[in-house]
DNA sequence: CTGAAAGCGCTAACAT
DNA sequence: ATGTTAGCGCTTTCAG
């Protein structure tokens, strides 16, 4: 591609074919020539070095504008050892909450002069490791990690002695990992949700949750149990279904639960993806949310807000999650002495018609 | 960052402070030294140049493995003039269909050795232009463009004489733009949807659509009208609401339509984001989908699939959209002689309970 | 088949 | 204040 057609063509034997409108990369050299100054002067002007005379500055700027010159990022990166690029690894881009997380991270990154390279491992821990590696080889300045459901040992190892600032979102890290972290306070939100259901009269409450080795799932289970304990009750252990975050798991467990003779009167889906599955399961068994059972989920997705009846959810500020992650990275980039930090963001339960009615309902048919 | 601590330290005066576990970037030099060969030999082995002797190859590979050497992407990019990176500009990452588009693009890109740099302009045409620019400065090898609702003149100009392969998704381009394109056949799907409603007995059908300057919206409007024409009917022009893709527009228009004395008996939302707004509007006016009116939308989002009743939609293969976009770029990267191409992907209407019943309904109370 | 050396485009020490 | 020059880490001619 960049065959360069400046004086350095000495040894390049360009293919005789037509140039086919190839780009005309203006280099700093062209600017220097045009402004009749040295390369370094151009560089100084453009990097706003203090030691530049007014007239020089003007000549350079004029030439720069005239030629439409813009420094080559790659060359700058190589020379400066800094790419102004952040890697953002998403374990599951199909999860709608990530749109907000990405927006939050990117808005902040852009405002600080960073671009984000996004990759999606779609739940595959090997891809996690592969992409992490790729980020490093591409010399990103920092990495935001929201890894797959299953952790990768290689990723874990990389966190022990990171070569660039890392921030891990809502995941466990090895004991002495030297990385920043952002967590949602999922336990608190789930505790509120569970307490709300208990208060409305439910005791047969089911929780369908992701695996316990996943920090958010574990926290939610903890919050669920805490609410029971606070009420002096014990959850029916048959109703706590711990498995996976995949919608199908939610569907299957919901079906199984609802077909029991002693079926639960309320179900909590422990993630937004599980909620879609749970809804499928409920529909499959012909029960009706808000009449036959109460339902609550996590994250304020369209589906929850617009469902009839609207579904109660534990919400969190996803945009902020991305933003904070980015901040934690960039603050360490700006100041290498800055310590790693852990930030916990609040969650909050929002009661809606799917659960906000007394149980048993006034007229149960 | 990369202060380098090899023999080249001649003029670099390293800060006396502690090295703070800085990365140990193994370079090709280290490998050459360890293998007792020249730099170029290492390079040849690793780039799989044919002219390398067996023993040499083995020595180099051994040294490479021993040191855990990996070529620096940035340096390779600068030298080769190729970054193996594709820019993907998304105009609206909040749209859930993009998760699939991204997956499609990225899976293919990865399989071909490319990474994707994703940016989100969130509907802002100025950001579109800015990001496009950024991509170019970062020397991406190709660009996938799914721009904001409103076009940017700067972006349009860039398409006239592109310096790298472009592919534009579902957007108009200037008359002699030299770019590949991927379109959805939105007219066809919308025509099917409208015909289906007419067939079920509706004539008072409303369409809430994005602006006509947006290609997909325009196509959908065309399909809508075509279906009426084919049935020998004329759509009520009061029922065709052309404005924006924002959910609020959908909500407001739905409310306005449903409050009319001569309200429509069926509504089609011309995009998945509009559908969320339309549902809000319907709920706000206390009408019930599937009883008081029929409803159809676009794209097979969770909301449509899991709503009660399930909502009929015009579907398309979003994953494939991303994949094809990527293919179109990479095929031109692999073969610079490859022509620009335009691919149209099919859409299909899927009837569900929200519309798949005769009108007027058997028992209308 | 191998090594020496030029140089991608830029920045920053060094030397005026 | 400005110019000269040495590289960043790599690939690729060119010479042997």
Image: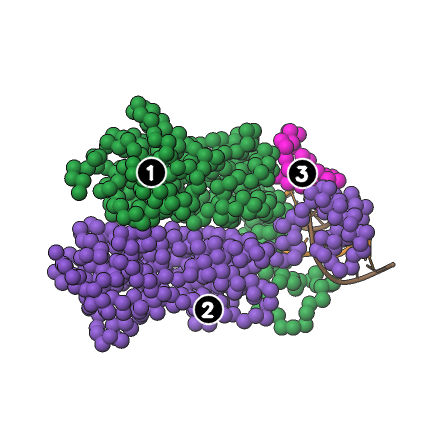
Chain colours: A purple, B green, C brown, D orange
* Mark 2 residue element: strand
* Real-space Cα separation, disc 2 to disc 1, in angstroms: 44 Å
Determine whether, in the image, residue B36 is placed left or right of residue A359.
Answer: right
**Is the Cβ of the residue at disc 2 closer than 8 Å to that at disc 1?**
no
Q: Is residue A6 rendered magenta in the image?
A: yes
* Mark 3 residue element: loop
Q: Which residue is mark 3?
A: A24
The correct choice, above or below, for A335 with respect to A365 in the image is below
- Residue drawn at x 75%, y 51% is A42
Magenta stretch: give its range.
A1-27
Observer-nearest of D11 and B223: B223
Dominant SS of magenta comes to loop
Q: Is residue A170 rendered magenta in the image?
A: no
x%, y% of residue B176?
Answer: 56, 29
User: Can you tell which quarter of the image residue A129 is in?
Assistant: bottom left
Can residue A234 be seen at all in this image of the molecule?
Answer: yes
Q: Residues within 10 Å of mark 2 (few under 14, many from 20)?
A: some
* Real-space Cα separation, disc 3 to disc 1, in angstroms: 49 Å
**Is the Cβ of the residue at disc 3 closer than 8 Å to that at disc 1?**
no
- Residue drawn at x 23%, y 60% is A294
Q: Which residue is mark 1?
A: B268
Determine whether, in the image, residue B39 is placed left or right of residue A362.
Answer: right
Q: Quadrant of the N terminus of chain A?
A: top right
Q: Which residue is mark 2?
A: A343
Q: Are marks 2 and 1 on the same chain?
A: no
x%, y% of residue A109?
Answer: 54, 57
Q: Report the chain holding disc 2.
A: A
């Amino acid at each position: 591609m960049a065959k360069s057609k400046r004086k350095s063509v000495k040894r390049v034997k360009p293919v005789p074919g037509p140039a086919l409108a190839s780009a005309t990369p203006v280099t700093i050299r062209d600017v220097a020539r045009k402004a009749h100054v040295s390369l370094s002067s151009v560089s100084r002007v453009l990097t706003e070095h203090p030691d530049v005379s007014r007239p020089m500055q003007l000549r350079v700027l004029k030439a720069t504008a005239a030629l439409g010159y813009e420094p080559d990022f790659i060359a700058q990166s190589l020379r400066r050892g800094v790419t102004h690029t952040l890697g953002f690894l998403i374990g599951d881009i199909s999860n709608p909450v990530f749109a907000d997380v990405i927006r939050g991270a990117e808005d902040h990154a852009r405002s600080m002069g960073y671009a984000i390279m996004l990759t999606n491992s779609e739940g595959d821990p090997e891809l996690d490791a592969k992409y992490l590696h790729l980020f490093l080889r591409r010399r990103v300045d920092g990495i935001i990690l929201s890894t797959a459901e299953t952790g990768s040992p290689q990723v874990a190892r990389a966190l022990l002695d990171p070569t660039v600032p890392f921030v891990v979102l809502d995941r466990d890290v090895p004991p002495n990992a030297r990385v920043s972290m952002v967590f949602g306070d999922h336990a608190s939100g789930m505790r509120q949700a569970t307490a709300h259901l208990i208060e409305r009269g439910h005791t047969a409450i089911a929780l369908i949750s992701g695996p316990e080795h996943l920090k958010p799932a574990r926290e939610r289970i903890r919050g669920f149990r805490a609410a029971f304990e606070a009420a002096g009750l014990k959850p029916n252990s048959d109703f706590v279904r711990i498995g996976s975050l995949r919608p199908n798991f939610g569907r299957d467990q919901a079906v199984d639960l609802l077909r029991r003779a002693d079926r639960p009167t309320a179900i909590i889906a422990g993630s937004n993806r599980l909620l879609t599955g749970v809804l499928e399961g409920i529909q499959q068994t012909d029960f009706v949310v808000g009449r036959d059972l109460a339902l609550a989920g996590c994250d304020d997705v369209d589906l929850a807000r617009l469902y009839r009846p609207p579904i109660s959810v534990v919400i969190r500020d996803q945009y902020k999650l991305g933003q904070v992650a980015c901040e934690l990275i960039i603050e360490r980039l700006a100041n290498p002495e800055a310590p790693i930090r852990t930030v916990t963001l609040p969650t909050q339960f929002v009661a809606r018609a799917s659960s906000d009615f007394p149980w048993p309902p006034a007229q149960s048919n």
